[in-house]
Image: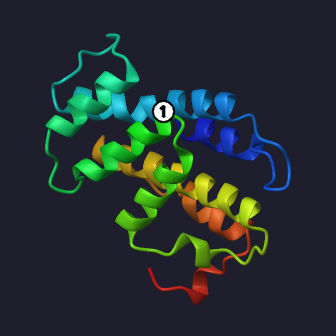
């Protein structure tokens, strides 16, 4: 699972390059499905190898009322699924309590939004892995922060 996500991040276009949003969302949803389905299996809401639409899986996960994951997280993923990428980013940043527009030393607003999208996606994937009990040392969000000029040693987390 880690290798697929890492390869996905490595293939992402640089902020100044064009991004096919439909393809990006489709591939990202497939990658988010993996830890989401493991979480639902762990909670007894999904049988292994069964089929469920992503939106139905989000609804089922939201109904679990996990104390560490509020409905806003699931709503952010629903926004992502529907193509409301800026809403997705803004909700994730609010939940994580960081001002995304101030994190990256990028002047162009479109480029900065793109990197914020990448970071929000990585944080979502990490959280889903955590919920599924599959978290480990792989930190794609840390990779994104370092790749786009954030010195992790100078920031408090």
Q: Is residue 107 left or right of residue 103?
A: right
Residue 14 versus residue 156 in the image, above or below: above
What kind of element bears circle 1?
A: loop
Q: Nearer the viewer, residue 61 or 39?
A: 61
Does residue 35 show up? yes
In the image, residue 47 lies at what x, y percent? Answer: 24, 15
Does residue 133 show up? no
In the image, residue 10 lies at what x, y percent? Answer: 74, 46
Q: Nearer the viewer, residue 129 or 73?
A: 73
Q: Callout 1 environment at 10 Å: few (<14), some (14 to 19), or many (20+)?
A: few
In the image, residue 86 lies at what x, y percent? Answer: 54, 52
Judging by the rendered image, the residue that carries numbered circle 1 is: 82
Quadrant of the image occupied by residue 33: top left
Please give the name of the residue rendered at 38% of the width and 51% of the height, measured from the top-left corner: 127
Residue 94 versus residue 11 in the image, above or below: below
Please give the name of the residue rendered at 29% of the width and 16% of the height, measured from the top-left corner: 48
In the image, residue 99 lies at what x, y percent? Answer: 50, 75
Please give the name of the residue rendered at 29% of the width and 46% of the height, measured from the top-left corner: 131
Q: Is residue 66 left or right of residue 113?
A: left
Q: Determine the residue located farthest toward the top in the rendered image.
A: 50
Please give the name of the residue rendered at 39% of the width and 73% of the height, measured from the top-left corner: 97
């Amino acid at each position: 699972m880690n290798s697929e996500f890492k390869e996905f991040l490595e293939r992402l276009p640089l902020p100044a390059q064009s991004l096919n949003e439909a393809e990006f969302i489709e591939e990202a949803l497939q990658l988010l499905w993996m830890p989401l389905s493991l979480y639902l299996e762990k909670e007894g809401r999904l049988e292994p190898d069964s089929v469920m639409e992503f939106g139905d899986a989000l609804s089922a996960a939201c109904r679990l009322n996990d104390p560490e994951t509020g409905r806003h997280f699931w709503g952010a993923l629903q926004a992502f699924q529907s193509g409301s990428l800026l809403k997705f980013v803004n909700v994730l940043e609010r939940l994580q309590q960081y001002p995304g527009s101030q994190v990256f030393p990028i002047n162009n607003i479109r480029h900065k939004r793109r990197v914020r999208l990448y970071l929000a996606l990585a944080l979502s994937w990490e959280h889903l892995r955590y919920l599924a009990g599959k978290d480990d040392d792989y930190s794609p969000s840390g990779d994104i922060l370092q790749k786009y000029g954030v010195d992790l040693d100078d920031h408090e987390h």
